[in-house]
Amino acid sequence: MIITELNCYPVKSLQGIALERAELTEHGLAHDRQWMLVNSDGCFVTQREVPALATIGVALDDSCLTLSHPGMPDLEVSLEAGLQPSGESVREVRVWKSDCRALDEGDEATAWLNDVLGPQGVSGLRLVRFAPDQRREVEHDYLHEGEPGRVHTAFADGYPVLITSEISLAALNRHLADKGETAVPMTRFRPNIVVSGAAQAFGERDWQTLSGPGYRLGVRKPCKRCKIITIDQSSGRIPSIKEPLRSLVELKTQPGWKGAFFGQNAIIESGVGATLKLGDELAISGI
């Protein structure tokens, strides 16, 4: 089995960046979900509330984070400045049940977001960065002995890494086709790592670890999907309010679990500092 896609999403719920290689950090792929948008109460905002976030492009280099949108000048956010917070820039924010310290990226970013999202009736969102000294622990329920307190993430929903399989997407799309529905691309599921060569569709539910050159990922929890997978990740439009959520429920991809599941959440068991690359061969151990 090999890695066929590596994707980083620097800003939670904005467009991702396809990579050929990525450094593995304790938070997941380097820079993944290090930023997010919050409302006036400091609560995180995603495509669940604002589907148009899917239309905001993201680029990253050694000096700045760049956001882009058709018809707008780019917004450039200095990486170095973001790591030198003043007292006014530190904010308390919330992502799901986690309260975190974050660094506000300033009024210029808010003004830019207002210009982009104002036509959607959205205003006042702030761009914040995960504070470098912040630790956000992963929920303990699905971790193994010795892992609680050691495993943490940034602004991802719950886990450092999300893994999906090409054979599982093919099975989902066959099911959609049989119903006369349109196939969906892997972008709908916003994975960090996509693999090919798995033996069977949805077989990832039985994986325990994935080992690559110098690193090992521990598969810990199936990913329950929400309405974001109904959103076209290039246009922000919703072609079908029910698909592919309904089909995932019908397929019972995670037997014994209620809901729509696609992909698996994973932690870094070992290999922080290693580099993942397209074409890496992965060895699977099962339950």
Image (tube, rainbow, N blue to C red):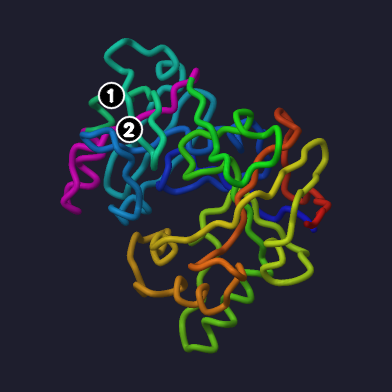
Is 173 rendered above or below residue 152? below
Residue 120 is inside the magenta segment: yes
Residue drawn at (18%, 42%) of the image: 123
The crowding category of the residue bearing disc 2, from other C-alpha atoms within 10 Å (few below 14, some 14 to 19, many at least 20), is many
Across and down, in percent, residue 267 comes to 65, 41
**Foreground: 170 or 93?**
93
Residue 131 is inside the magenta segment: yes
Q: Mark 2 sits on what residue? A: 127
Is 151 rendered above or below residue 175? above
* Quadrant of the rendering where the C terminus is positioned: bottom right
Is 44 rendered above or below residue 120? above
Across and down, in percent, residue 80 comes to 46, 17
Is 28 rendered above or below residue 91? below
Pointer 1 and pointer 2: residues touching (CB < 8 Å)? yes
Across and down, in percent, residue 4 comes to 70, 56
Is 24 displayed left or right of 74 in the figure? right
Residue drawn at (24%, 45%) of the image: 116
* Quadrant of the rendering where the N terminus is positioned: bottom right
Residue range highlighted in magenta: 111-133
Mark before the other along the chain sequence, 1 or 2: 1
Residue drawn at (67%, 68%) of the image: 202
**Foreground: 27 or 222?**
222
Which labelled disc corresponds to residue 287?
none
Q: Mark 1 sits on what residue? A: 106
Res 269 → quadrant:
top right
Callout 1, which amino acid?
A: Gly
Query: Dot 1: what SS?
Result: loop
Across and down, in percent, residue 182 comes to 47, 79
Residue drawn at (56%, 82%) of the image: 175
